[in-house]
Image: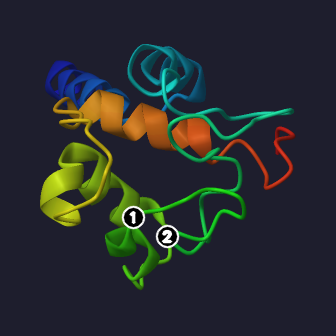
Amino acid sequence: MRTFVLGAMLVVASTGASFAQSADDGMGVFQRFCSPCHDVGPGARVKLGPPLNGLDGRKAGSFEGFNYSDVMKNANVTWNEAQFKEFIRAPQMKFPGTRMAFTGLKEDADVNNIWAYLVSFGPNGDKK
């Protein structure tokens, strides 16, 4: 019986680890997929896309100094974990007509990790 319980605990623990979010892993995802167009952190600047500092709780299409598409300006979305994760999987499907040409992240781990990384930065780019 103890062997069964121990085995069950290991399965649960290993399954839970697959759902964990890692800001460190998210940094790698950001560098691979996002950094050509977006900045984050201290000194983040407008590139092809807006900086992503302070994304959690920010209204879509609202970063001062970035020229958003009308679709994003009129999205009436405040970024949170659920909104972002739906968007980053398929930006063109979430907001048809957005100028963001990225096709989306397909792996759950990448989606979870990029969110963990982005929310680790406050609005001024400092780590929380």
| Residue 97 screen position, x and y as percent | 20, 62
Kind of residue at badge 1:
Ser
- Quadrant of the image for the N terminus? top left
- Whole-Å distance between the Cαs marked 2 and 1? 11 Å
Q: Nearer the viewer, residue 22 or 27?
A: 27
> To which quarter of the image does residue 2 belong?
top left
> To which quarter of the image does residue 47 belong?
top right
Q: Nearer the viewer, residue 51 or 57?
A: 51
Which residue is identified by label 2?
60
Local secondary structure at mark 1: loop
Residue at image location 77% in from the left, 33% down from the top: 41
CB atoms of marks 2 and 1 within 8 Å: no
| Residue 125 screen position, x and y as percent | 82, 42
Which residue is identified by label 1?
69
Determine crowd level at label 1: few under 14, some 14-19, many 20+ residues with C-alpha closer than 10 A: some
| Residue 70 screen position, x and y as percent | 37, 74
Kind of residue at badge 2:
Ala
Determine crowd level at label 2: few under 14, some 14-19, many 20+ residues with C-alpha closer than 10 A: some
> To which quarter of the image does residue 110 belong?
top left
Q: How is the image coloured?
A: rainbow
- Quadrant of the image for the C terminus? top right
